[in-house]
Every structure is written in C-alpha cells, then in structure tokens.
Image (cartoon, helix red, strand yellow):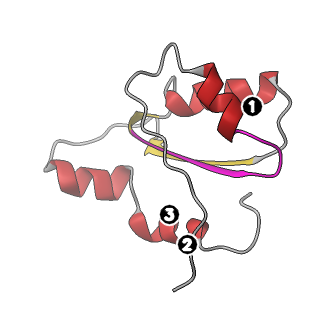
Amino acid sequence: MEELDATIIGVRNVKNIDKHILQLYLKDNTNIITVEENSLKGGFNEEIKSYILENKIKCSLHTFGIKDEFVPQGIRHELLNEFVVKPVEIKKLLYSTEKIK
C-alpha cells in the first residue's frame, strides 16, 4: 500500500479555533477534509470555510457531517455510518490522485 501524506487535527471547540494551527496547515493547493459528528450548518466546517475565504486560500474542501435534516433515533455507530462518517467515501478521497472538488 502506498504511503499517505496526511495530517489529522483534533478540535475540541468550534469557536476560538487556534488560528496558528490553521496558518500552518491550510495552504494553497491542499486537500482539506472535515469530519464532524454534528450539523454541518453552523459547525466546524463553516469556521474552516470562513478562514479559507478570508485568507483567499486556493484549496479543495470536502465536508462530512449531518446535513440540515431530521436524524432518527438509533444506535450511535449506525447513525454515524449512515449520516456522517462514510468510511468508503473518505478512503476514496484520501487515495485519489486528483484534486478534491
């Protein structure tokens, strides 16, 4: 298997994101994937999008999270697989040779 050049950044709070970390990793021509267990609307990905736009960074952003829709009750693992994580899609993005759109 081919080696993957990736960085994983764990974020505890959406507000007051460490701008220094964003400056280090959000650069032109990078592929950025956000995964969050909460709603995409008003979530972590929107903070990242705002930073990218404010700093005119030319990169590709792909987000995984709960769309603005009703989510039924259920077992956490099953709900994450159905509404958020989608491991197969993330793996395909990570190993893609093309820039993420």
Decide: few, some or many residues near mark 3? Use Cα within 10 Å; few <14, some 14-19, many ≥20: some
Q: Amino acid at mark 1?
A: Ile
Q: What residue does disc 3 label?
A: 90
Reading the image, the residue beneath label 2 is: 92
Q: Residue at x 76, y 70 (%)?
A: 98
Which residue type does callout 2 highlight? Lys
Check disc 1 and report its element: helix, strand or loop. helix
Judged left or right of residue 56, residue 43 is left
Disc 3, SS: helix
The disc, 2 or 1, on the residue closer to the chain's N-terminal end is 1
Q: Is residue 94 above or below residue 73?
A: below
> Residue, x 23% and y 42% (percent of image)?
72
The kind of residue tagged 3 is Ile
Which residue is at a point 67% across and 40% down the rendered structure image? 25
Residue 101 shown left or right of residue 71 in the figure = right
- Of residues 41 and 52, the one nearer the viewer is 52
Q: Tag 1 or tag 3, which sits nearer the N-term?
A: 1
